[in-house]
């Protein structure tokens, strides 16, 4: 699956409703490393919670988790920088997710941060940014409660995307005014 430009395509999980052309790229662990999360946990979070919430928020949902041979790092970085919005699942403090999130934030582009209840605090993230916490149970009843709240959280992040108090602007202080 490659485009005419030779760039590998990402997997589109859900098309946005209506005429929206906005894209949301998901960065998250795709393999469970913590024994408290059974095999398939992150696939279920993506399928049951993130995808419906983003679709309801008028974003086409994409991920780089796919089959085949390509330079996955290139696919991730290009989609990470080109997406209108990125949602990062910080559960398990995955180093790849943290690296990708850092790149996105350094570009001062909008992000949505989520993590499962019970995920420990993240230095330099939890103290400054809002993080949506979802139930790790993923029962239908908890997903039905969490999904509309995540949808609203995503919409709020999108509405605040041009804030003068973004993470990178705060950290850079007065230097950000010349950016």
Image (cartoon, grey):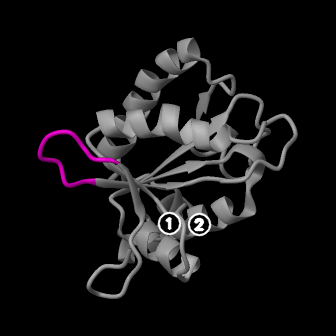
Query: Nearer the viewer's eye, disc 1 or disc 2?
Result: 2
Q: Which residue is mark 1?
A: 104
Res. 95 mark: none
Q: Is residue 2 visible?
A: yes
**Residue 69 at x, y percent in the picture:** 55, 79
**Residue 118 at x, y percent in the picture:** 77, 30
Q: Which residue is mark 2?
A: 100
State the residue at coordinates (44%, 65%): 108
Please tell me whether mark 2 sits on a helix, a strand or a loop.
helix
> Which segment is the magenta one?
14-22
Which quarter of the rendered picture does the N terminus lie within? bottom left
Specify the quadrant of the image occupied by residue 67: bottom right
Q: Is 120 positioned to the left or the right of 88 in the image?
A: right
Q: Are marks 1 and 2 in contact (CB under 8 Å)?
A: yes
Is 15 magenta? The answer is yes
Please tell me whether mark 1 sits on a helix, a strand or a loop.
helix
């Amino acid at each position: 699956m490659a485009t005419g430009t030779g760039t590998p395509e990402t997997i589109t999980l859900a098309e946005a409703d209506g005429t929206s052309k906005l894209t949301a790229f998901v960065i998250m662990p795709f393999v469970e490393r913590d024994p408290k999360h059974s095999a398939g946990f992150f696939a279920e979070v993506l399928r049951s919670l993130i995808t419906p919430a983003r679709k309801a928020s008028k974003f086409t949902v994409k991920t780089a988790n796919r089959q085949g041979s390509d330079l996955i790092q290139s696919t991730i970085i290009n989609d990470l920088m080109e997406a209108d919005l990125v949602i990062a699942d910080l559960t398990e403090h995955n180093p790849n997710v943290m690296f990708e999130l850092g790149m996105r934030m350094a570009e001062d582009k909008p992000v949505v941060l989520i993590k499962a209840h019970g995920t420990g605090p993240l230095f330099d993230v939890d103290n400054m940014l809002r993080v949506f916490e979802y139930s790790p149970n993923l029962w239908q009843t908890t997903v039905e409660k969490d999904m509309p709240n995540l949808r609203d959280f995503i919409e709020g992040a999108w509405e605040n995307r041009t804030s003068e108090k973004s993470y990178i602007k705060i950290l850079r202080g007065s230097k950000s005014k010349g950016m």
